[in-house]
Image (cartoon, rainbow, N blue to C red):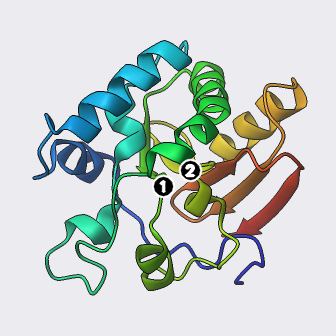
Amino acid sequence: MIDDFEGPENDVADFDTVETMLRGTRDRDSEEMIAFRRFFDQSTQAQYFTADEFLVLGPSNSNPSSACHDKNSIAPENLWPNVVPLVAAMDAIREKLGHSVRITNCYRASPYNTCVGGVTSSQHLNFKAADFICSGGTSGDWAEAAMAVRRDGVFKGGVGIYGSFVHVDVRGSNANWDNR
């Protein structure tokens, strides 16, 4: 089933691959990266995540044999404030799960979003969404934790369940979908 919320979300990675993607090949000491880290540290109270984890560019972007290779970028500075409630949501979800969580997608530039099958209204385009995987449980378990955190009032937004990951966004209104 392809939903009307985020699209097929076919840009997936396993837990160990994400670690490699985080290391990546981009200049981790670029002015943009340093500026985002400073913003992140000043604007969030993240317990479980670093700024770099919200800058992961996605599995297809990191794969030289992918048609989507190098089509993503770091979120523009004017969108950075949008990630603050997402950081709080992801931190609370990680706390609820009690297992390591890895973000596989966060911000998507429009060409990358199109390439991976995202819809034009995707919250990833606004730096308000994260796809994640967890070291324990199933995507159904992870989505249940995300919905519990949402019920607790930590965020308002979407929770989408896919076969190997969960999508969470802070769009401001609740939405659920199951694409397993």
**Residue situated in front as seen by the camera: 40 or 21:** 40
Q: Residue at horizontal 63%, vertical 42%?
A: 142
Read off the residue under disc 1. Answer: 107
Coordinates of residue 30 in the picture (x, y in percent): 16, 39
Q: Amino acid at mark 2?
A: Phe
Q: CA distance from mark 1 to mark 2?
A: 5 Å
Q: Is residue 46 visible?
A: no
Q: Secondary structure at mark 2?
A: loop
Coordinates of residue 151 in the picture (x, y in percent): 89, 31
Task: Indicate left or right for 101 with 1 as reference.
Answer: left
**Residue situated in front as seen by the camera: 32 or 117:** 32
Q: Report the quarter where the N terminus lies.
A: bottom right
Coordinates of residue 52 in the picture (x, y in percent): 32, 35
Q: Secondary structure at mark 1?
A: loop
162 lies above or below 120: above
**C-beta proximity under 8 Å, tags 1 and 2:** yes
Q: Residue at horizontal 57%, vertical 59%?
A: 124
Q: Residue at horizontal 71%, vertical 59%?
A: 160
Q: Report the quarter where the C terminus lies.
A: bottom right
Q: Which mark is residue 127?
A: 2
Q: Residue at horizontal 79%, vertical 25%?
A: 154
Coordinates of residue 88 in the picture (x, y in percent): 64, 25
Q: Which mark is residue 169?
A: none
**Residue situated in front as seen by the camera: 61 or 35:** 35
**Residue situated in front as seen by the camera: 135 or 122:** 122
